[in-house]
DNA sequence: AATGAATGAGAGTTCATTCAT
DNA sequence: AATGAATGAACTCTCATTCAT
């Protein structure tokens, strides 16, 4: 008897794929590894996905669809560019910080080739960056953010900083909490690394004293 | 004496590898493609490299060795944390912005797998991040930089921002000048995206006027 | 159920391997030759055997398992060391004399390397020689065989003689019947090449006469 | 300056080849291994030998030429078929028992393929077997050996027995003296394994007593 | 729909041989 | 004569995909 294609089986395959891709890498992973991990036959994979690449692509698409939707949801009630950036950062770091395997796939395996990357850049990532960009625009509109400042560049810098937090976290043997970096990153992005003039004056004085003592 | 092993041939192979890896990706590149592009026989590759992976690793090691050495040189005469960060950013973006193929290999192909990435993270990248970290420490020491501010986090954010500039440049069809982004990135990193209080007040007033007019 | 792995296919591969190894030698034989001869795809070979060497080893193991089992069977009803040796010799020469390709594989290809030989010596060949050794021991026990006489040495000599019959038969262009050499070999092994004293006397006399005539 | 081809270098290569072939097998041995072991450049090998196979063939030819010549020498002063067989056996076992590597090459590597074997069988081995055959013929002529007895078969049996002594010795981890097996092998070949009638009677009696006692 | 045996193209690597020096 | 870098043909094995059951 023909059982019907279950969405449950599909997501079992995707879950298995995350695990296997994370452990062995996209090229190192065999389709049969994924099948075994999902407890289906090799051929069954091809009832749900066109080919190996399609598994990876579907993985990204589906996770991102949910991620962006939820992100929009969270953003809805939040006012102010700064607060909104914090929401984005927390959302981003929560997703990946909560699932190391998924993080590995997103930070490493999805960047296999320019082919993949172009695909993503043109798709979800575009949307994702657009959200950030809009918040920044909003901030510039209401005077919260500096009016000089390329919106594009700021968007990339913000995303790049977040992205590096994740990559660094993946590669670190320590299992620290990733979400807790959201606030400091946003703070740095907003205030910058330089001391304010007032702070700077104080600091210099202290430094001078320090030098004097020695 | 027989025809002697020339270092020239070795670097011809490495140059060819950059080209081929950039166009086809590491896994998509065949050793024979590299050989053909370097105008040597397939077997000759193996006189200079242990295997395909060794080509990629050597590529990275040798480019980085030179890059870091030159970077140290440039940094020598420069005083002040802010100026030094600018030197680093320009140096970074100049290297990759000057050779798209190399940039692709560094941004994409070298991040094939956690295996590779761990290797790099433990090696040159460590050194590279250490240089940035030292500059930030220095800036905190002399009061230029905010004393609160995790040095580690700031280092990652700065590197992440630069890294994203390069990745974005690679994927963009436009051929803009990458180095010109050094100053804005450093400025953003130092001053932050937020308007200063004074600026903010002005901005808000202007914004109010704007709203009033409509 | 998918097409099931048939033992028939496995033995088709083994049969093909015998043919191909015999004609081209183990190293000269390509796996694809065997595949073609067995009418399966190259990859199919690897569903049944770990690698090329495993084909050769399995070949030997399986043929020997059957050969030794059948030999034990035949030996069961036979009484007397001399008769038993004859059974062994006939059994040995029948196996190889009935399949020239198999004989080539056993006499030549399986002796490729000390690695192979040690493997075999430690395995089936050991068992095989043990059977001969037991028969000789039995013969010594019941007074049929000379009590002085190293059992080990006699075993090797008997096996060596049989072995050389096969090798010689393989290399000969003539297609004579190998089994018919069983009786003479056993006879030689038992009685020796020397004339008995009585025979010797007669022979000498005849010889003398012969000389006298010339 | 062109140094002249020295026969010393040639034999250095052959000696190296014996070692390398014995350790790695003919196919496992790389020409460069032999070159390194002989302390010459890879290319130099080809000034003395046509190709890899020619090294093996030359090895066999040259060792056999000397072996057969020396064998003829030794045989010269010896009278009587039995004594002559002993000389042959001792000579054979002395050559190979004195140089394990050479023995491995002769027993194993030279039997790589029917191609090799046919070559040898048609050449030196032919001569070698002919010597044995002649001695047997002589023994039959003077009444020492049984007149019924195929000369060919007896020759093969004798050679086969000797050959097996060597093979067995190679594969044994024990380092026993091979030459000491010459006399027992010849004895077995001449007298046979069976007890003489007189012996047999005595043995049976003893055996009966033995049974009675239990 | 599910299975998993079968397929066969494909690629990294080795190494005997050549030949410029 | 000697060298050893260079060559490139050759071959095993893997694995994504197909398809008979």
Image (cartoon, coloured by chain):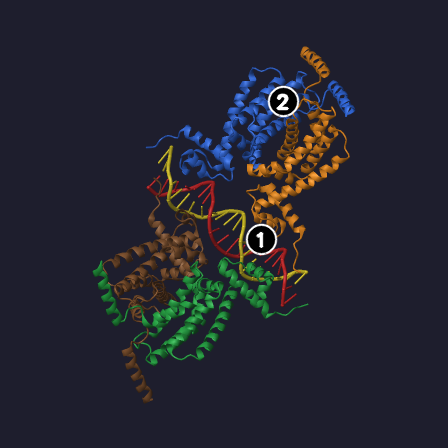
Chain colours: A blue, B orange, C brown, D green, E yellow, F red
Kindly indicate whether the residues beneath marks 1 and 2 are on one polypeptide chain. no
Vertical placement of C180 versus B79: above or below?
Answer: below
Packing grade of label 1 (10 A; few <14, some 14-19, many >=20) is few
Nearer to us in this view, C93 or C174 = C93
Vertical placement of D69 versus B98: above or below?
Answer: below
Residue occupying image coordinates x 49% and y 61%: D22
Is disc 1 placed on a helix, strand or loop?
A: helix
How many numbered discs sit on the rendered protein? 2
Is disc 2 placed on a helix, strand or loop?
A: helix
| Residue C176 position in % (x across, y down) | 32, 69
Which of the chains bears the disc numbered 1?
Answer: B
Q: From this viewpoint, which residue is outermost toward the left?
A: D212
Vertical placement of A152 versus D85: above or below?
Answer: above
Mark 2 = which residue?
A184
- Decide if residue A92 is in sight here: no
Q: From this viewpoint, which residue is outermost toward the right?
A: A212
**Residue B58 sits in which quadrant?**
top right
Q: Residue B43 — which label? A: 1
Nearer to us in this view, D27 or D139 = D139
Judge from the rendering whether residue A176 lies leftward or rightward of residue D204; answer left or right. Answer: right
Nearer to us in this view, C122 or F9 = C122
């Amino acid at each position: 008897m023909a059982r019907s294609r279950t969405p449950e089986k599909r997501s079992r395959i995707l879950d298995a794929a995350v695990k296997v891709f994370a452990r062995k890498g996209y090229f190192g992973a065999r389709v049969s590894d994924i099948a075994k991990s999902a407890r289906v036959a090799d051929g069954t994979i091809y009832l749900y996905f066109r080919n190996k690449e399609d598994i990876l692509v579907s993985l990204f698409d589906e996770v991102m669809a949910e991620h962006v939707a939820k992100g929009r949801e969270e953003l809805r009630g939040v006012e102010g560019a700064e607060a909104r950036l914090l929401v984005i950062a927390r959302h981003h770091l929560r997703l990946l910080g909560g699932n190391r395997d998924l993080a590995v796939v997103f930070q490493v395996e999805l960047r296999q080739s320019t082919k993949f990357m172009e695909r993503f850049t043109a798709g979800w990532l575009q949307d994702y960056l657009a959200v950030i960009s809009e918040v920044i625009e909003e901030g510039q509109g209401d005077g919260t953010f500096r009016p000089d400042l390329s919106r594009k560049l700021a968007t990339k810098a913000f995303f790049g900083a977040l992205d590096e937090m994740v990559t660094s976290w993946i590669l670190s043997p320590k299992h620290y909490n990733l979400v807790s970096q959201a606030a400091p990153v946003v703070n740095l992005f907003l205030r910058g690394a330089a001391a304010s003039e007032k702070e700077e004056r104080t600091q210099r004085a202290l430094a001078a004293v320090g030098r004097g003592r020695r």
